[in-house]
Image (spheres, helix red, strand yellow):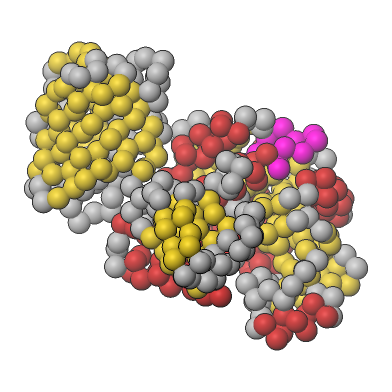
């Protein structure tokens, strides 16, 4: 049978703020070994006989995910379904099942894997997938049940009778969780295995509105960049927002479970991240540079700056370039409330890091104030920004490393290190790196409005030009450079 691992990569990972943000969600978090959760999921999917992986994700994450796969070694061919916004896992699974059925037939098996889980026992995982695939070939909807080692209130539970699911239970209280463990319940991992035809049949039976709306959306969708299907935003907005668990698994009589011990965690909080690090004699776990005095039981993570702590116990301290989190470890799940407050106020710290990834490279805001913004821009070898212009700002480019090929109005020329150019507002311009080493420039923006949505693209090798793309509106959602 043909197995198509299907990675679901999205969400905000609000409990892992400030490292996880809307445009840098939990799957991109790097662990102590240097790999991201997404890379681990991708490599985990490279099972014997598997040659390709399908990823369902937000369009804004597409190029970043491709870079992650490439860095991981790219053992699998990759295709993508690009959502304009989230509509829940039922929509994601419906899109994937219909797409796989069209490409490989109804008997092709989807192995649906969240891209932000950690599994430490690869051999046990492969064995569990083999068992699940056999059940899937018999027309079953298979989930993976994890043998619990503690009463966990952050997971759902499964009551099973052999390989048949009796019922699913929502995240319980601590007391209920203890009862469920005593009764032999399993953790619900959120991973699934089924053939495309069975998934479509069961969705038709239990959530026909979701399936019909997704069919309409796929009919209106177009091929995007590379091997990517870009979903039509207007029709996708009509898809009911619901999880696959609620829409199908909890209702279906075809639900089965493979019980497994995989060394599994959904890495749902900073305490889960802390458990992956090695503790010192005082139970402190440190990632980055930290100096401690009379500190015990703390997790400290720094992405660059030195962190010092004195006389504290059982804290989570996470320092990033633009935000610091300090939380009692027993309240780590409540970090999501800070994220919700920031998002509700439209604060940039809920959405972006200062270092922002783009298909051509990265930019970092170094400083900004009234009427100016200073960025460090790094362009990958052979990459190019779009041909574009801005209504409200001018830009100064200073090359500090590498070679820049520049279009500025009617002129095209090359700049080397320590050379610069000035781009007036409404001048068409493009920046390209023709060399084999990274290009680094400092960009100084000046103007009355410096939002990322003050951009009009005329040409872009990454397919980001829309037909009749409107001029920038300061009140519009942020566009991408």
Q: Quadrant of residue 330?
A: bottom right
Specify the segment rendered in magenta.
Answer: 44-55
Residue ID at (34%, 15%):
434
Q: Position of residue 20 (x, y in %)?
A: 46, 55
Residue 88 appears in view: no
Q: Residue at left 78%, top 49%?
A: 121
> Residue drawn at (77%, 69%), measured in percent from left and top?
149
Left or right of residue 374, residue 30 in this image: right
Left or right for 37, reference 48: left
In the picture, the quarter occupied by the C terminus is: top left
Q: Quadrant of the N terminus?
A: top right
Does residue 51 belong to the magenta stretch?
A: yes
* Residue 184 among magenta residues: no
Q: Is residue 103 above or below residue 403?
A: below
Residue most toward the right? 162
Which residue is nearer to you in this view: 269 or 259?
269
Residue 272 position within the rendered picture, expressed as x and y whole percent measured from the top left: 61, 62
């Amino acid at each position: 049978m043909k197995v198509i691992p299907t990675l679901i990569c999205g969400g905000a990972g609000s409990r892992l703020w400030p490292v996880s943000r809307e445009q840098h969600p939990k799957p991109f978090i790097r662990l102590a070994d240097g790999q991201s959760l997404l890379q681990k999921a991708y490599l985990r999917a490279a099972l014997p006989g598997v040659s390709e992986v399908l990823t369902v994700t937000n369009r804004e994450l597409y190029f970043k995910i491709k870079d992650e796969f490439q860095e991981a070694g790219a053992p699998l061919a990759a295709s993508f379904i690009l959502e304009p916004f989230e509509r829940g896992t039922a929509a994601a699974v419906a899109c994937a099942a219909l797409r796989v059925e069209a490409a490989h037939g109804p008997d092709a098996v989807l192995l649906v894997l969240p891209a932000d889980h950690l599994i430490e026992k690869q051999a046990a995982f492969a064995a569990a997938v083999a068992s699940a695939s056999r059940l899937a070939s018999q027309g079953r909807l298979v989930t993976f049940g994890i043998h619990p080692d503690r009463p966990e209130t952050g997971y759902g539970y499964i009551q099973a009778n052999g390989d048949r699911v009796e019922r699913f239970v929502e995240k319980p209280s601590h007391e209920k969780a203890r009862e469920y463990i005593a009764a032999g319940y399993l953790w619900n991992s959120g991973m699934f295995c089924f053939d495309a035809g069975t998934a479509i049949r069961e969705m038709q039976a239990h959530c026909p509105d979701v399936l019909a709306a997704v069919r309409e959306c796929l009919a209106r969708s177009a091929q995007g960049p590379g091997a990517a299907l870009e979903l039509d935003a207007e029709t996708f907005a009509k898809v009911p927002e619901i999880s696959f668990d609620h829409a199908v698994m909890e209702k279906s009589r075809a639900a089965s479970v493979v019980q497994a011990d995989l060394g599994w965690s959904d890495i749902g909080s900073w305490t889960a991240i802390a458990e992956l690090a090695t503790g010192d004699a005082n139970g402190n776990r440190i990632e980055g540079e930290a100096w401690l005095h009379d500190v015990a039981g703390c997790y400290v993570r720094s992405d660059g700056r030195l962190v010092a702590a004195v006389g504290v116990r059982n804290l989570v301290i996470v320092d990033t370039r633009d935000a610091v989190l300090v939380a009692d470890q027993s309240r780590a799940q409540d970090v999501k409330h800070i994220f919700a407050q920031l998002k509700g106020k439209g604060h940039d710290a809920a959405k972006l890091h200062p270092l922002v990834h783009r298909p051509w490279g990265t930019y970092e805001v170094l400083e900004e104030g009234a009427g100016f913004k200073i960025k460090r821009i790094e362009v990958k070898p052979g990459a190019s920004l779009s041909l574009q212009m801005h209504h409200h700002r001018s830009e100064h480019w200073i090359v500090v490393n590498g070679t820049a090929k520049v279009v500025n109005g009617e002129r095209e020329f090359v700049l080397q290190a320590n050379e610069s150019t000035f781009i007036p507002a409404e001048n068409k311009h493009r920046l390209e790196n023709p060399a084999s080493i990274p290009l680094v420039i400092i960009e100084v923006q000046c103007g009355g409005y410096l939002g990322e949505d003050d951009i009009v693209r005329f040409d872009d090798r990454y397919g980001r030009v829309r037909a009749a793309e409107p001029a920038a509106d300061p009140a519009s959602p942020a566009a991408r450079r």
